[in-house]
Amino acid sequence: MSGTVHLERDRGVGFLVIDNPPVNAGSADVRRALLARIAEVEADATLLAGVLIGAGNSFVAGSDLREFDLPLSPPQLPQVIAALESSAKPWVAALHGAALGGGYELALGCDARIAAAKTEVGLPECGLGIIPGAGGTQKLPRLVGKARAIALICVGTRVKAAEALSLGMIDALAAADLKVEAASLALSLAKDPQGSKRRVIERAPPDDPEAEIEAAVTKATAQGRGRPHILSAIACIRSVGKIPAAEGLATERAEFQRLRILPEAKALRHIFFAERAAGRETGTKVAPLAVRRIGVVGAGTMGAGIALAALQSRLPAVIVDSDPAALERARQRIAGEIDRSQKAGRMSNAVADAARQGLVLSQDMSALSDCDLIIEAVVEDLAVKRQVFRAIEQVARPDALLATNTSYLDIDAIAGATSSPDRVIGLHFFSPANVMKLLEVVAGTASSDQAVATGLAVARALGKQPVRAGNAFGFIGNRIYAAYRAACEFMLEDGALPQEVDAALQGFGFAMGPFAVADLSGLDIAWRMRQQTTATRDPRARYVSIPDRLCEAGRLGRKTGAGYYLYPEGKPVPDPVVDAIVIAASAEKGTARQPLDAETIRRRALAAIVNEAGLVLEEGVARSAGDVDVVLVNGYGFPRWTGGPLHWAGTQDATQLQADCAAAARAAGPDRPIADLAGLGLWPDAG
């Protein structure tokens, strides 16, 4: 059985306690129990009103998504809500923890909503490729207006209780005891001589100016990349007040059911579950170490970003660097970001003040002596990193966790510079570290279970999406991205231009093409890595010199105003000079350039990604296909609505994709391995 609902009676009020741990998801069993208990309250003459409340830490955090790939079992949520709305007795939703999705729609079916101070409410369904399907698009606009409803629903915003009260999403905040105050509110409604029912569905929506609605539509469409569920949500919201309420509810439900079974919604559910699985440690019960203070060695862009991420999460941070100018730049950057976050309301005054007070800057390594976690974030050079770790070990507590932020280097080689490699892990942040969600937690050969468990716990404490990765060149993400970028560079030699490759891949759904990304991050970073690995490069591997030529010409990307593109006004503009460099590189190799259409570009680039992702999985660098998908979606701009590269691969023709992967491997040079995609179970129903 998946959840139940208990009826408790107290002084004329029937409390329906929804009990389906851990988050009271609205399963079929919960819906059946709700209907039965609502009928009991309705039939009991001693009960004057009803209150819905959740057991444990939440009201109802949403529907049980595991049911969405199956035919939905009756009763469905609209039937439960209809029972509330047709009841002769008033109902109050007592909200605490999370009241999201179907949980908030259940609350909207009540006559009033009261919430504990730390409650969050919202309708996040659009994040799963669907729309609210139990009245959300028809009722929220009647409370907050159409323009605000479009913004809230299409983004899936979680709204804190105080703001929800000001917007009208709830009716009251509990000052002390939620249950007692909900009962008082319910009884006051029962005694209301004007009638107890105040159904949301019967209210007229506020009269928003059409210009505000149009502005909200334009913004939501752009933010949602014009995906079908976004357009459907907008259409349903705009219909409120223009058609009968019953028709609006029926249309919304039909759209929900249609979208629920589409491949896009299935892909988004896949990545939803994969993200939750990726952050869990398996096979060990070791408790993580407590981390109350973080140290960072290196005051560059990454080091300052890591420290800022800690401060934003209420963890004091120490930055150590031998260069006082670098420390001052880090101080200014962090202070500026805290100020901006405070002014924008993203940080409360108390959190902002604590962040300012929690930052320590020092040129002395001994400032790290009281840190629970020390993260090295210096230049990507093995000798330098080993030297830094030897220095860290001289001042760190014996129980402190040590981590390297390396993007490519061998964790074991770095840990080998210490006398206790068991407490060394990789924490691969993505730039900007205070913004990007992904954090690869890399286990070295000697890394202890406790060290890895602590790394995963720290990632969660920082609000990051953790993924455990094995110790291999580039780990999961950078290794796959390197294969992708190389395939795109091959296409430059074969006949494409940078802007053509970028346009084709943006057409697939990437936020930016690979060459625009390279310009944004700086071409010199990869150039430096190529220079360091020249001696170990396989001479048979295909090597494209175009990026080197750009760097040699001083074109390092946006920061120099020129890279693959020119940036006369901060926006990329194709440059004939780059076209000439590309064409000359082809001529020097004797390559006869052939035009590549957008579909060919996409097939070649995606095959390179999928093939390398398959190899990463085969070699155990990633623990699951879902982990690979989480990394590429959260760190590299792979379109979320595809579910990630390996989920997407499982939706393609197996024979064609395997052939494309073989071609991608051959294009990279002789003896390049080809992933056995069928053996990875990407097409479980094949054969």
Image: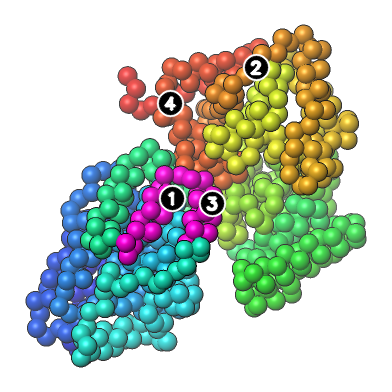
Whether tag 3 and tag 4 are in contact, CB under 8 A, the answer is no
Provide the residue designation for mark 4.
Answer: 652
Task: Check disc 2 and report its element: helix, strand or loop.
Answer: loop
> Mark 4 vs mark 1: which is more N-terminal?
1
Spatial CA span between label 1 and label 3: 9 Å
> Mark 3 vs mark 4: which is more N-terminal?
3
Provide the residue designation for mark 3.
Answer: 223
On the image, which quarter does residue 41 sit in? bottom left
Spatial CA span between label 3 and label 4: 27 Å
Task: Check disc 4 and report its element: helix, strand or loop.
Answer: loop
Spatial CA span between label 2 and label 3: 33 Å
Judge whether residue 227 is colored magenta: yes
Q: Amino acid at mark 4?
A: Gln
> Mark 1 vs mark 3: which is more N-terminal?
3
Provide the residue designation for mark 2.
Answer: 595
Position of residue 555 in the picture relative to residue 429 (left or right): right
Query: Mark 3 or 4, which is nearer the eye?
Result: 3
Q: Amino acid at mark 2?
A: Pro
**Residue count near mark 3 (Cα–Cα under 10 Å), binned few <14, some 14–19, many ≥20:** some
Whether tag 4 and tag 2 are in contact, CB under 8 A, the answer is no
Task: Check disc 3 and report its element: helix, strand or loop.
Answer: helix
Q: Amino acid at mark 1?
A: Ile
What quarter of the picture does the C terminus occupy? top left
Of 442 and 545, nearer the camera is 545
Of 479 and 508, nearer the camera is 508
- In this rendering, does residue 110 appear at all? no
Q: Residue at x 31, y 50 (%)?
A: 256
Provide the residue designation for mark 1.
Answer: 230
Q: Amino acid at mark 3?
A: Gln
> Mark 1 vs mark 2: which is more N-terminal?
1
Give coordinates of residue 111: x percent, y percent: 27, 77
Question: What span is colored magenta in the figure?
Answer: 213-242
